[in-house]
Image (cartoon, rainbow, N blue to C red):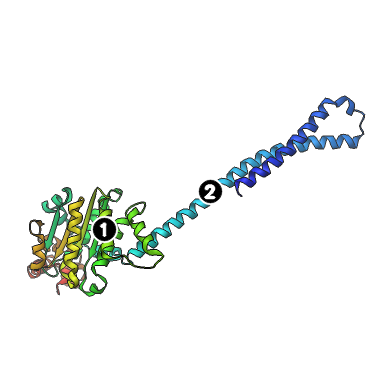
Amino acid sequence: MPRTILHGVERYVRNVAEDLRDIHVVIKNNEAKLDGLDKEQNKQFKQACDWQDETTTSLKRLREDGGTTYQEVKGVRKEQEDRQQRDERQSILTWLTPTDYTAQQHDFVSRRQAGTGQWLLDSAEFQAWLETDKQTLFCPGIPGAGKTILTSIIVQELTTRFRNDESIGIAYLYCNFRRQDEQKIDDLLASLLKQLSQERTFLPDSVKTLYEKHKDKRTRPSFDEISRTFQSVTAIFSKVFIIIDALDECRTTDGCRTRLLTEISLAQANSRANIFATSRFMPEVIEKFEGSISLEIRASEEDVRRYLDSHMFRLPAFVRRNPDLQEEIKIGIILLVKGMWVPYVRI
């Protein structure tokens, strides 16, 4: 019930109460004269007094109920406004790009054997990259070395570590040669922009302005517009982590890979952006990271053993009953994999 209606009802009831109060005063002042009234008249005067008391009580209850109702209406209206803002926020983010790497991240990190990859997180190279601004950590590796799983471990480490810090931005890409048609430079940069924007409680003004500019015309932003907005959003954060897996699988058509590296390097130069990237040993990629911190990705013996220990139960019963045979199998596999991550090796 709107507050103006409640005020109108309250004024009406207050007027009635005042009229009844006046009648009550008259009765009190003329009690001696009223002794001569018959029983029915006395009864009517008594009812008038009772009505005055009831009206006063009702007026008090109306105030209490009206206040409660008003607060309930305010609460409902606030929920509607919040829902509308959430819907608008999601519409803008989806408009930037419908691509969402979250599902891939969850899939990759779910394949991690507990405890594996810790060697990378504990390495001096990773710790230096983590603690120092404007650093780049490049991690090349042979095919099947587990680069993507280790990338997902780093993403998980960062998102967990900075979960409650809105001043830290985290964005990541998983390049895939099978998806090159949907991983053009506009799509990749828009995805980074989307991830950084959605980490803010309120979308950055530059993102909303970009959306409003194209919304009515139903047009798409140009690469230059996405680039300017991306650079402005990275500058909002006190620090930004940009993670890119499998740069060797990033499309090269239209200079996509070169333009992507240029954009994130510009963000690094203009703000406190740290870059992590993986790739196969490709000269044209490696040369882009000359002078950067570098750490080769190889499946460590400890990681291989952890994985094998967790899968011994899959072997025949006679192997499970023979610890020496199990150890012999583990050593043979460790020698076989030569730095490859075990799930990619046919055993």
Is 30 located above or below residue 5 in the figure?
Answer: above
The disc at residue 74 is 2
Q: Residue at x 56, y 50 (%)?
A: 73
* Among the two numbered marks 1 and 2 on one chain, the one whose residue lies closer to the N terminus: 2
Question: Residue sitting at 20 percent across and 73 percent down?
Answer: 177
Choose between 132 and 298: the one closer to the eye: 132
Query: Where residue 242 sits in the image (x, y, percent)?
Result: 21, 57
Q: Residues within 10 Å of mark 2 (few under 14, many from 20)?
A: few
Q: Nearest the camera: 297 or 190?
A: 190
Closer to the camera, 86 or 54?
Answer: 86
Q: Which label sits in the foreground, 1 or 2?
A: 1
Q: Quadrant of residue 59?
A: top right
Question: Looking at the image, is 184 positioned above or below residue 272?
Answer: below
Image side of residue 19 versus residue 126, left or right: right
**Which disc number belongs to residue 228?**
1
Instruction: Return the residue nearer the eye: 317 or 14.
Output: 14
Vertical side of 229 occupied by 167: above or below: above
**Badge 1, how many Cα within 10 Å: few under 14, some, many 20+?**
few
Dot 1 falls on a residue whose secondary structure is helix
Residue 54's quadrant in the figure? Answer: top right
Looking at the picture, which amino acid does disc 1 mark? Arg
Q: Which amino acid type corresponds to the residue marked 2 in the rendered image?
A: Lys
Please indicate whether residue 170 sits to the left or right of residue 53 in the image. left
Give residue 111's position: percent from left, percent from top.
Answer: 24, 65
Distance from Cα at disc 1 to Cα at disc 2:
40 Å
Secondary structure beneath dot 2 equals helix
